[in-house]
Image: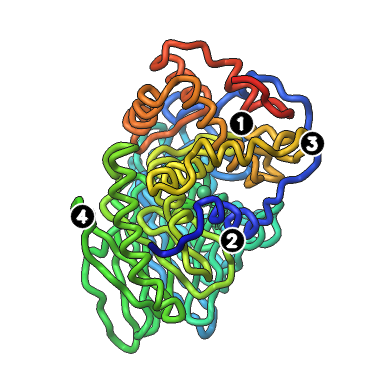
Amino acid sequence: MASGRPAIAATTVLLLALGCSGSGETGTPVTGSAPPGIASPASTPPAAGPGAPGIGDPDFPTDGNGGYDVEHYGLKIDYNPGAKHLSGVATIRAKALQELSSFNLDLSGFTVERVAVAGGPTTWQQGLVFERTGDELTVTPSDPIPAGTAFTVEVAYAGEPRPVKNSSNLGTYGFIPTRDGAFVTCEPNGAKTWFPGNDHPSDKARYDFEITVPAGLTALANGEMTDRPRTTGGKTTYRWREDHPMVTYLATMTLGRFELREGTTASGIKNLAAVDPRFRDSLDDLYTLSGKITDYWATVFGPYPFSSTGGVVDDFSAGYALENQTKPMYGGFDPDEGIIAHELAHQWFGNSLSIRRWKDLWLNEGFATYAEWLWSEHEGDSTAEQLFRRHYAAGQDDAIWKYAPGRARPDDLFNSSVYTRGGMTLHALRQRIGDRVFFELLKTWSGEHKYGYVTTEEFTALAEKLSGKRLDALFDAWLFQERKPTTW
Ligand code: TRP
Ligand code: ZN
């Protein structure tokens, strides 16, 4: 075992690191009825004109963009850690959902050097007109892109990447330079700090990465290496591919010196652990625990949705972790079982099943927190029931009861209530519907929405359907009320 610490300690580490001690503020009164969701791209009514500068998440109005759906990102990036200079060419394949006279990409910082578009009836339109306003890059093709057509946009950009700082309670995220490379953790909207795109979880795509770094450094990205690293002229190029749909905030490229251990888990899933030399002593534990936990989650949540598992520990004192697809990232500490169980559970809840709007974040964090409790129970440490009771003991005035986790707030998205009270919601549900139906529900949920998008309403509807019980009072008390639930 990597650590004798109970899983609950990992939650504490995670939340303290995020500064999520919970705020005592009360928000507007909450009703049980959920806000309207973002329409699925397919149901967007076709309209001619410019694509909207946001994808329609009312809490994050300029995140993502309207009017198109990305299918593939080809990211060719050269980074020099000494100069902190990045130059990139992003080739984005998308489908127009309306006739587009212009469209937006999210991009923060950098100088855009060139934009070209191909698609529809035209071949490449070079040297296009583009405009920068805030974190929006607006591209105006010389001919509009017809509705329903596939098109490709190529953006060449360069400069010093700048992470997002002090946005609400999140600290620093995005592309973060380190001593020997970079640490890239982008939730919720930091992908725009290293590539142009549709930076919102409701537009997944596949990715190819071609990353060039000074020889001697390693570049790790999502998915699998498609070719061996190639070194010429003092630089090495790494090629990676994520061939499963992925949201922008889970895309990563971790650059630096790493020690690697590769193999397969007992059930045959590829496993890659990578650690900064300073964390050399955790390489074997990270590798072994990641494999063992991935295999266990596959028995509880359904087949592992991606082509490999593992994790990365970098020498960056973030003190936090992020569930980057196939390669969760641990910033500056030895991850213990609880946090590994958490980040790997996200591969199902958050990564394969992704939220359409940020207020449903408990579908990611509540599930991953509950997974920590399930792991603890599985290991014969505290049971989920004991962990639930420990949290439920918080007095009526505790901040956790004042924040409704079913409506994560944009100014305090990662509040501990979204994690802990979200996890408690699942335990209350388990008590109510019984273990057999509860665990069937987890598998059905992850199976039915594999690689898709989900909302809270879809989860509560499925829970009612599988249990044959009316659960609206339970979910209302646990997810939507700003007071301590007393019955369920
Ligand atoms: N999703 C992360 C977790 O709970 C927490 C997180 C949110 C995060 N935003 C982040 C981590 C930005 C790193 C960077 O596992
Ligand atoms: Zn999490």
- Name the residue rendered at 50%, 54% in the picture: 6
Q: Quick check: can you spot residue 337?
A: yes
Q: Is mark 2 within 8 Å of ligand 1?
A: yes
Q: Earlier in the sequence, mark 3 or mark 1?
A: 3
Q: What is the three-letter code of the residue carrying label 1?
A: Gly
Q: Earlier in the sequence, mark 2 or mark 1?
A: 2
Residue identifier under label 2: 173
Secondary structure under the numbered disc 1 in the rendered image: loop
- Label 3 – label 2 distance at C-alpha: 32 Å
- Name the residue rendered at 47%, 59% in the picture: 115
Q: Quick check: can you spot residue 44?
A: no
Residue identifier under label 1: 406
Residue identifier under label 3: 397
Q: Is mark 4 within 8 Å of ligand 1?
A: no
10 Å crowding of disc 4: few (<14), some (14-19), many (20+): few
- Name the residue rendered at 43%, 20% in the picture: 462
Q: What is the three-letter code of the residue carrying label 3?
A: Asp
Secondary structure under the numbered disc 3 in the rendered image: loop
- Label 2 – label 1 distance at C-alpha: 24 Å
10 Å crowding of disc 1: few (<14), some (14-19), many (20+): many
